[in-house]
Amino acid sequence: MDKELCILSPVWPSYRAFAPLLAECLERFWPGHPPLFFAAPTSWNLPESSLDPGDDPHGGNNWTWTLLQGVRKIRAQGYRECYLIAEEHLPLASCHKNHLEETIPDQARELGAKYVSLMGWDNRRYSFRSPVLPGQKHRWMHLTGHRDPRFHLHPAWWDLETLEKCCELSLENPEANGSAWHFEKICDLAGKRLPSESCYQISARAMSLRSSAPWLSGVERWIFNKLMAMVPLLPDAWKRPYYDACGFDMVFCDGPYPMVFSGALAKGRMNPSLVRFSSRVPSDILEKIHRLSQR
């Protein structure tokens, strides 16, 4: 395994109970995974190495500041790359160990990538048409379009220097709340201040441990792309109800890191996507998620 690669998980206080479950799911579905580090106070007694961020000058409510301290600490240990995984973005089935530990880091370095999202572009939610690399490159999408999701916080491979720059950029405005949502919005708009031309998104189906029917996913994607095209044409008051009714976010991404869109929780409750695909999740894991979501 590449010793320059680790897993970093910044822990939000309200979701700290999910950190042990993330460690458990990684051990179960990705045995022998790279070292896992939680950016969290050591007093929380999390099950893996904790990178204590120290006293938050923002009163303990700044997610980006906590992440930045974790990034700086693992860089000081010699790591140059990480998989950034939020504490509640659990793997829900067996991971493709070889792709995660070898194929993705190797290809990312070859391409000069700075960010590679593990949430596959080949699902119902995405309608952009940026260039797709050939099959021998596992059909990654090069995120070149204006609205492509660069530097988002689904599980992803990151160049740590770039991740540190993203954190610093997000923290430039002291009046902002430093939330994960704010991080994504600021980095989306950064333009030339970040290496936005070096971002990629995998094809989940091309890198999954499990085989699937390509024609079926292709038909689903075509249908939902047509439905997605209606969103800009609708009155503003109708857009969100239409979006929810169509179920664009109801995605089980069965790639090298199997997950549901947005993780275990949505607005503090169990994610409807997780409920929708509960038959694909081991019952004991589902029970633990349900119990934690009730806290």
Image: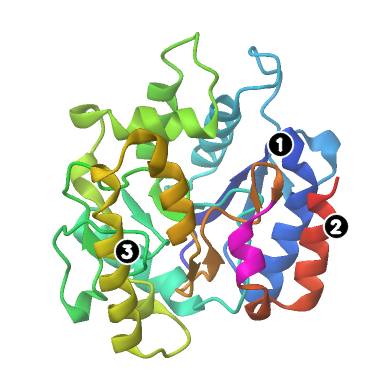
The C terminus lies in quadrant: top right
Q: Is residue 112 above or below residue 106?
A: above
- Give residue 229's position: percent from left, percent from top: 23, 55
Q: Residue at horizontal 53%, vertical 71%?
A: 258
Which residue bears the numbered disc 2? Answer: 291
The magenta segment? 270-276
Tell me which residue sits at (49%, 9%) in the image: 174
Query: Is residue 26 located in the magenta-colored stretch of the structure?
Result: no
CA gap between label 3 and label 1 equals: 31 Å
Q: Amino acid at mark 2?
A: Arg
Q: Quadrant of residue 207?
A: bottom left
Q: Mark 1 vs mark 2: which is more N-terminal?
A: 1
In the visual, does 10 lie left or right of 243?
Answer: right
User: Mark 1 highlights which residue?
Assistant: 40
Q: Is residue 60 visible?
A: yes
How far apart are the two marked residues, 1 and 2, measured between alpha carbons? 22 Å
CA gap between label 3 and label 2 equals 31 Å
**Residue 69 image position (x, y, % from top left):** 57, 29
278 left or right of 221 in image: right
Mark 1, other Cα within 10 Å: few <14 / some 14–19 / many ≥20: many
Numbered label attached to residue 104: none
Asked if disc 1 and disc 2 are in contact, CB closer than 8 Å, the reply is no
51 lies above or below 121: above
- Residue on which the image places disc 3: 121
